[in-house]
Amino acid sequence: MQSIYALHQYFIPMGRKHSLDPFQDTINDFFNNADAWAFTEFRLYDLIERHRYEWGLSHDKGVKYIIDYLKKRKLLLTNSFRDKTNKEKEIYSWKTQEDFTVISGLKSDSFFCYYSALYLHGLTQQIPKTFYLNAEHTSDSYGRSDNPDITQEAIDRAFASEQRKSSISYSLDEKKIIITNGKRTGKLGVIKNYNDHQHFHYTDVERTLIDCAVRPVYAGGVFEVLEAFKLGMEQVVVKKMASYLDQIDYIYPYDQVIGFYLEKAGYDESTLKLFDKKKEFNFYLTYNIRNKNFSDRWKLYYPKGF
């Protein structure tokens, strides 16, 4: 049986009206149709401040007053994250505490990628406890393929060490969230999942496989990536993947990596030819390979036993 205190939380005495009650439907419609359902405190305050007059609220109705009202009505819910220094970061979510939706509020204009997207597409049999949320670089120059410094020596040097990983992370209960900062693509291949309880963006199958091939450290490693290519065979539109790769325009020749994965996963020869282009450099399936084999077709080093 619920305690009297617990029942009191949901009990609104008859006849006692709140000054914001007449505006609740308008505010409700706005957030129901908003592009995001989870917000940092700064973003939420800014959002309310910019739209309050559209909702018909006068200047005497302060932002904190509005937020407190929405919290009491269980429309805005609070979620406490902690960063690596154990500092608390509060995220407000609209009507739901579904994991992906709440986590998406950590970064505005962000989307789930890498292992998180593999999971959402059913391309892994694991249930991950780490979530990967990406916010793209604001500069177009980051990672462009017209970088004049690319040489075989530079490639060899870069791939001789461990792949760099993001240092930005948060925790929510037992869950870990890694914030990545990827190449600017205009959110190429990003799709949305909107329903009554979920409200977030994530990469489609084609973009997901590209991202995981480029940064296998965020996808469980190269063996997990290969398994995803196999499981995705019935979903992926390979011509779309080739188009995405051209548009992203990486510095490094990742068409060699994608072609290799497709071959190992058993895709047909006509598919492989989409990526079998002129190869100027020897390349690597991943970073810091201790014992290497070499694919003559793809001019690619990969781990022995792969």
Image (cartoon, rainbow, N blue to C red):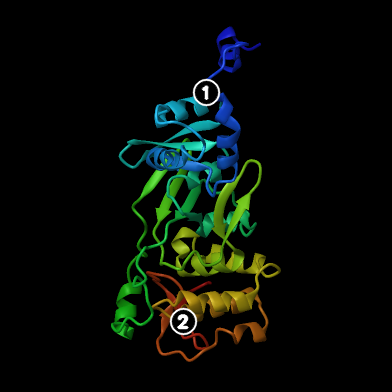
Placement of 29 over or under 114, stated as above or below: above
Q: Nearer the viewer, residue 242 or 66?
A: 66
Pick whichever, 229 or 185, lies toward us: 185
Mark closest to the chain's N terminus, 2 or 1: 1
Residue 82, position as x, y percentages in the image: 38, 37
Quick one: which residue is furthest to the top in this view?
4
Amino acid type, label 2: Leu
Residue depicted at x 45% and y 89% = 279
Quadrant holding the N terminus: top right
The kind of secondary structure element at disc 1 is helix
Residue furthest to the right in view is: 234
Residue found at x 71% / y 69%: 234
Marks 2 and 1, how far apart in space? 59 Å
Question: Percent from the top left, x then y, of residue 123?
Answer: 62, 60
Q: In the image, what residue occupies the spot 60% across and 14% down?
A: 11
The residue lying toward the viewer, choosing from 208 and 139, is 139
On the rendered structure, is 111 left or right of 290? right
Location of residue 87 in the rendering, given as x and y in whole percent from the top left corner? 32, 36
Return the residue at label 2.
300
Task: Say what secondary structure mark 2 lies in.
Answer: strand
Residue 54 pos. (x, y %): 50, 40
Residue 215 has which mark? none
From what the image shows, is residue 239 above or below residue 93? Answer: below
For badge 1, the amino acid type reads: Lys
Mark seen at residue 72? 1
* Front disc: 2 or 1: 1
Residue 174 showing in the rendered view: yes
